[in-house]
Every structure is written in structure tokens, then in C-alpha cells.
Image: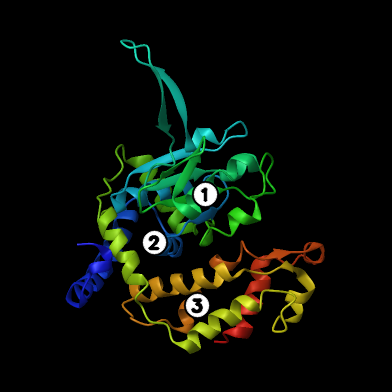
Amino acid sequence: MTVSAINAPDARQLVDRFGTTFTAIRGEVRKLIVGQDEVVEQLLITLLVGGHCLITGLPGTAKTLLVRTLASALGLSFKRIQFTPDLMPTDITGTDILEEDQASGKRTWTFVPGPLFAHVLLADEINRTPPKTQSALLEAMQELSVTVRGNTRRIDAPFFVLATQNPIELEGTYPLPEAQLDRFLFNVVLDYLNADDELKVVSDNTSRVDPPVVNACTDAAEILKFQWLVRQVPMSDEIGRKAVALVRATRPTDPSAGEDVKKYARYGASIRATQFLALAAKSRALSLGRYHVTEEDLRALALPVLRHRVLTNYQAESDGVTVDAMLAGVVNSVLPV
């Protein structure tokens, strides 16, 4: 059965399966990841929407472990790229090599696929490599394909790029190009744990020899059906206008922008942000057992959707105004509690 052929009874069963699978995946992830429930939820929303996620956090906050654990719980193929300053684009896309048949002496070009050809790609410390190599991800993220020597090759769906980065003020990092940033559904901030959770991490990792086994809760075919199901969740015109108003209020040239945005924002979010916000809100609603989008869904997801799409100016830096602080004001003005 293809996704496009799902009928009403099958869709109802799929809704039930969505909820149980979402809960099961969270349970598997918690075997290894302590705390960070909100981050795990946002990563799952990213995957069930069919987007990509940027995970920002200081070293030692379990960014890599989180992605690897999530891939195992999803039952998907997984590959990891450690981005370094000397990494070349062909190191991630793959390349053609010239092979010679020993019997006939005939030479042929053979494509050797790179690590992009996986369901879940962990781009570890993506901002450690120069923009030329970062940009090699753009086609794969947007088109699910790579082009090498003029030949385009498809990447099997579902395909997710989960990229980790350290804060750009740390030595040896490169800011990501804006065009690439805009293709990430979320920018999730992985912060330090509270004292109790940190104590549990220390206890677990200094007492046990073998980590718990993470079991697969779904597979690639079912995830594609979940992605179809998310898009069937209705969103009223009123909520749609709220989403549009929220994104437009981040643009300093828009009449609806507040004084802080006009003063501190250099560029606002694009229309892609509105589309991603709507999709993410649908996925969140479904994961919570609702079949419609509410203002609370928009409010909960506004910051991770927008924080990497809004650029502040020098005045904001001078006054110590962060993107998150400015966006919090926008959310409160458009979606008051």
C-alpha cells in the first residue's frame, strides 16, 4: 500500500499507531538520554515532518549520543560525518572512480556513494568545516539528491540531516551560510542538565559496563506514512493567519513589526519559516492526541523554528539583546497567553 492510497479506516489505524509509536520512541531514547524531553520531542517532530534539525550546544552535552540513539529507535540506516576543516564536498557526496576490468582491459566509471546515502545523517560539528563543504549538503537537504560529475543520484526517503554545532564564538568554527540555515526546520538548543539529572548521568555512566539496548519502534515505510498523516491534520484559517502574522512580525520592514524588531533585527524569517511552523504545529498536535492545531502549538515551536532565521544587527549586540529575547517579545505580542 502506498502512502497516497491510504483510505479512511487505514488512516484511523495510522493515527492510533502514530501515538503509540511516538510514545515508544521516547521511551527507548530515555534509556540512554537523561532529561532533555523537550529536545527529544522537537527532534521527533522534525523527523515526522520530514525536515532537518540543527542542534546547538556546548561540547559534552550529549548531542552525538542523542542523534545516534534516536536513529536506533527509528530503525533507520545511520551514518555519521565528523566535519573538519579539511573535509571536501566529495567526502560526503561520494565520487566516481575509474576502474579497469582485468580481463578485458576496459575502463569504466563507478560511483562510490558517500555517507549522504543513509536515512539518518549525523553531521557532527557542522560548523567546524568551511562553507564550501557545508554547502554540499544543500542539494541533498532540499532535493533528496546529489550531483557528481553532472550525474544526479537520488537519496532514498526518508532522509534526515541532524547537524550538531558548537556556539560560533568558540575558536575554530565557521558560521553556517544563511541559505543552509533556512533549510533546517528547527534550531534546537541543548543546554546543561539540572543537578539531579546530571547526577543520574554520572551514576549511570560510571557504574554500568554495557549500555541499555535501544530497540527499533518503526521503520522507513511507516515513517513515510506518518509524514503523510501529519499533513492531513487540519489547521483553521484563524490559526493560519496567526502563523503568518508571527513570521511577518520578525521582518523589520513589515508594518506589523514591533519597535524591538525594527531596532535590532537585520533580516526577518522567510515564507519557508511559515510553512515549517505550520507543519511542525500539526505534528505536535497529533503527537499530543489532538486532530487540530492550536495557538499553543505555534507558541511552543516558534523559537526553534525562527531563532536561526532572524539575524540581529550591531545595535542588538551592543545592547546585549539576543535573538531569543527579541523573538520572545514577538511571540508574546502576536500570541498573548
The amino acid type found where label 2 is placed reads Leu
Residue 236 appearing in the image: yes
Mark 1: few, some, or many residues within 10 Å (few <14, many ≥20)?
few
The residue closer to the viewer here, 165 or 32, is: 165
Q: Is residue 70 left or right of residue 58?
A: left
Q: What residue sits 61% from the left and 65% below the top?
A: 307
Q: Quadrant of the C terminus?
A: bottom right
SS for callout 3:
helix
Q: Which mark is residue 300?
A: none
Residue position marked by numbered label 1 in the rendering: 139
Q: Are marks 1 and 2 in contact (CB under 8 Å)?
A: no
Residue position marked by numbered label 2 in the rendering: 44
Q: What residue sits 50% from the left and 44% below the top?
A: 123
Mark 1 / mark 2, whichever is N-terminal:
2
List the single residue furthest toward the bottom.
238
Instruction: Give the percent coordinates (x, y) of residue 217.
Output: 25, 56
SS for callout 2:
helix
Q: What residue sits 29% from the left and 38% below the top?
A: 210
Instruction: Give the percent coordinates (x, y) of residue 292.
Output: 37, 82
Choose top left, top right, bottom left or bottom right for residue 84: top right
Residue position marked by numbered label 3 in the rendering: 298
Between label 1 and label 3, give the one nearer the viewer: 1
